[in-house]
Amino acid sequence: MKSQAGQAPQEVLSFPCEIMVKAMGLAEDGFEMLVVQLVRVHAPNLGDNDFTSRPSSGGKYLSVSVRVQADNRTQMDAIYRDLSAHHKVLMAL
């Protein structure tokens, strides 16, 4: 959202909220658990039913979606920063 001069931009999300975090990488053994572990550092209450995986049509890539109960923007930024920084994560959405 645009902000007027001198004003902070308005938050699009209202916290706390549930959000889906998605990470994509090569379909290698352990990629799903890697993504879950990276997210769990910042959202320790993840359950076994809070993530799903889906391979690409050619099977080369894996998309991992994680449902997170986000408390604030700082927590979300930290999740995306850690996912994006990992060399096995090709993209985080």
Image: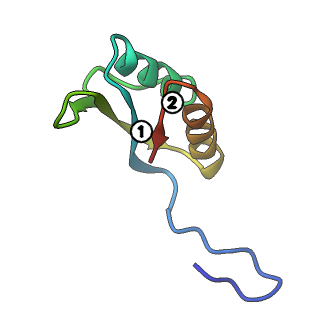
Q: Are marks 2 and 1 in contact (CB under 8 Å)?
A: yes
Residue 37 position (above or below residue 23):
above
Position of 50 with respect to 82 (left or right) is: left
Q: Quadrant of the N terminus?
A: bottom right
Question: Mark 2 or mark 1: which comes first in sequence?
Answer: 2
The alpha-carbon separation of the residues under discs 2 and 1 comes to 7 Å
Where residue 9 sits, quadrant-wise, is bottom right
For disc 1, the marked residue is 68
Which residue of the protein is positioned furthest toward the right in this rendering? 6
For the point 49% across and 44% down, the residue is: 70
Position of 14 with respect to 27 (left or right) is: right
Position of 21 with respect to 71 (left or right) is: left
Residue 77 image offset from top left, x and y in percent: 62, 45
**Residue 50 is at least partly visible in this image:** no
The local secondary structure at tag 2 comes to loop
For the point 56% across and 45% down, the residue is: 76
Which residue of the protein is positioned furthest toward the bottom in this rendering? 4
Taking depth in this image into account, of 79 and 46 the one nearest to the observer is 79
Classed neighbour count for the residue bearing mark 1: other residues with Cα under 10 Å, few (<14), some (14–19), many (≥20): many
Q: Amino acid at mark 1?
A: Val
The local secondary structure at tag 1 comes to strand
For the point 62% across and 32% down, the residue is: 85
Position of 51 with respect to 13 (left or right) is: left
**Residue 48 is at least partly visible in this image:** yes
For the point 58% across and 68% down, the residue is: 11
Residue 70 position (above or below residue 15):
above
Q: Amino acid at mark 2?
A: Ala
For disc 2, the marked residue is 43
